[in-house]
């Protein structure tokens, strides 16, 4: 069975890699509708005056539901650092799994691009979105470093450092760690816990996955760079995440009392961070949180057929049934916790079978979303393509490692 899966993964990944070479490194995004001034103004109106705002965003919502390729009329293709980081990690895993130098070279390429495209105007390395991001709390200017994007770059440079030992990657990791430590603010929630800001501009905390990301990044940096201060900050963010877990094992997106939805990939983000931190530190509370979290995840975030579903508790009406991003994070989490939770092996098996049979297109790319009617076939690097590539490369590396053992 492992040989069959290995061969299938190699075939899928080779087709995708060939597509990526032809398609290029920029793409549209699900936020393309709102990245331009007109769409951004409509979205801002939606948050300020919901009734009028609903009318303003309706054409974009309808386009998303019935004419996804209409994105091209709202914003040009963009380069997304979070996608570059995922591609760097994916090709690094592919190099480790196959030993082929061409994959190492592509990993280095994406890492070099990351280093060149960090957020301008900040002393330390960080990355955000290449568009003005309109949120309920205001507009985050383009290229503002985000703690939900920057950790992926840190991991990418870490992977390259582990692969070739080049000190230049370590220097970038040091700068990223300092950014996460110095530029992101903490907001105490108890004597032993703090949430953190989403960006250096934030004056409030409360987003659970943001604190989980920062806790992971600073924990990893405390180990690799041997800095105890990083761990002290990370542990407070970790305690906040652990304290925020609900009785049923889930996490709301935020503890602000307003954004209390529960979705698939943000749940995966939190569980992955806990699993990595536990592996690095042996932290006593992570194990119990993972047990409860995985129990909820496996029961609540899959449909009756066992396929990943976007929401357990949705924030609003959605125009799609399934999301490529959810499949990617499902695979990432299942590989990370392989052999520990048998139910995750089952969940991943169904996800892979469905992914292989319905989601990869003839050109090698993947469908982005299963809509209420039909598919969203627009390839979006940030919204699924890079994540699914990284997850399948991670799985291939795990399969090869298990075969070696």
Image (spheres, helix red, strand yellow):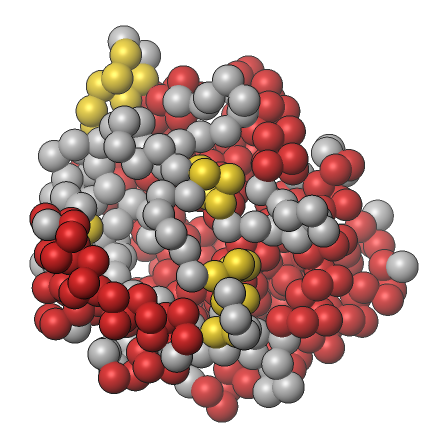
**Image height of 44 relative to 260, above or below:** below
On the rendered structure, is 136 left or right of 304? left
Looking at the image, which is closer to me, 357 or 363?
357
**Image height of 56 relative to 167, above or below:** below
* Corner quadrant of residue 178: top left
Which residue in the rendered view is the most extreme toward the top?
Answer: 191
Q: Which residue is depicted at the point 56% across and 50% down?
A: 309
On the rendered structure, is 316 left or right of 245? left
Looking at the image, which is closer to me, 46 or 218?
46
**Image height of 398 relative to 38, above or below:** above
Q: Give how far across and how far down residue 353 sits, in percent.
A: 75, 62
Q: Which residue is depicted at the point 22% across and 36% down?
A: 197
Instruction: Answer whether residue 239 is visible to the viewer in this image.
Output: yes
Which residue in the rendered view is the most extreme toward the bottom?
Answer: 22
Q: Which residue is depicted at the point 77% across and 36% down?
A: 342
Looking at the image, which is closer to me, 73 or 335?
73
* Corner quadrant of residue 63: bottom left
Q: Give how far across and how far down residue 277 sits, in percent.
A: 50, 31
Instruction: Answer whether residue 101 is visible to the viewer in this image.
Output: no
On the rendered structure, is 252 left or right of 277? left
Q: Which part of the image, by quadrant, shows the N terminus?
A: bottom right
Q: Give how far across and how far down residue 405 sits, in percent.
A: 84, 48
Q: Give how far across and how far down residue 369 sits, in percent.
A: 50, 67
Looking at the image, which is closer to me, 70 or 360?
70
Q: Which residue is depicted at the point 59% across and 23% down?
A: 292
């Amino acid at each position: 069975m492992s040989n069959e899966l290995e061969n299938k993964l190699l075939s899928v990944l080779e087709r995708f890699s060939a597509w990526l070479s032809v398609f290029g490194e920029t793409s549209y995004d699900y936020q393309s509708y709102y990245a331009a001034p007109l769409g951004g103004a409509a979205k801002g109106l939606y948050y300020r005056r919901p009734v009028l705002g609903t009318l303003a965003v309706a054409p974009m919502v309808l386009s998303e539901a019935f004419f996804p390729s209409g994105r091209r009329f709202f914003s040009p293709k963009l380069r997304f650092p979070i996608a570059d980081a995922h591609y760097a990690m994916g090709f690094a895993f592919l190099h480790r799994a196959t030993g082929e130098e061409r994959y190492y070279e592509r990993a280095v390429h994406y890492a070099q691009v990351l280093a060149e495209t960090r957020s301008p105007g900040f002393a330390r390395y960080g990355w955000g979105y290449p568009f003005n991001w309109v949120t309920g709390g205001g507009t985050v200017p383009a290229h503002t470093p985000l703690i939900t994007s920057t950790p992926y770059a840190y991991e990418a440079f870490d992977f390259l450092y582990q692969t070739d030992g080049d000190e230049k990657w370590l220097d970038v990791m040091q700068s990223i760690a300092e950014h996460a430590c110095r530029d992101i603010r903490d907001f105490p929630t108890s004597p032993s816990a703090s949430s953190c800001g989403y960006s250096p501009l934030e004056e409030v905390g409360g987003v659970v996955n943001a604190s989980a990301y920062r806790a992971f990044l600073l924990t990893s940096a405390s180990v690799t760079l041997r800095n105890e201060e990083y761990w002290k900050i990370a542990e407070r963010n970790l305690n906040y995440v652990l304290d925020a877990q609900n009785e049923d094992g889930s996490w709301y997106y935020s503890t602000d009392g307003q954004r209390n939805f529960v979705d698939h990939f943000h749940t995966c983000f939190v569980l992955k961070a806990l699993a990595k931190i536990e592996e690095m530190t042996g932290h006593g509370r992570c194990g119990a949180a993972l047990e409860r979290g995985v129990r909820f995840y496996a029961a609540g975030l899959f449909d009756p057929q066992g396929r990943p579903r976007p929401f357990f508790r949705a924030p609003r009406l959605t125009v799609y049934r399934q999301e490529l991003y959810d499949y990617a994070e499902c695979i990432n989490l299942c590989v990370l916790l392989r052999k520990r939770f048998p139910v995750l092996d089952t969940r991943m098996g169904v996800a892979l079978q469905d992914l292989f049979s319905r989601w990869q297109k003839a050109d090698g790319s993947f469908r982005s979303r299963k809509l209420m009617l039909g598919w969203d076939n627009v390839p979006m690097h940030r919204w699924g393509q890079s994540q699914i590539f990284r997850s399948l490369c991670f799985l291939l590396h795990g399969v090869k490692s298990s075969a070696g053992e």
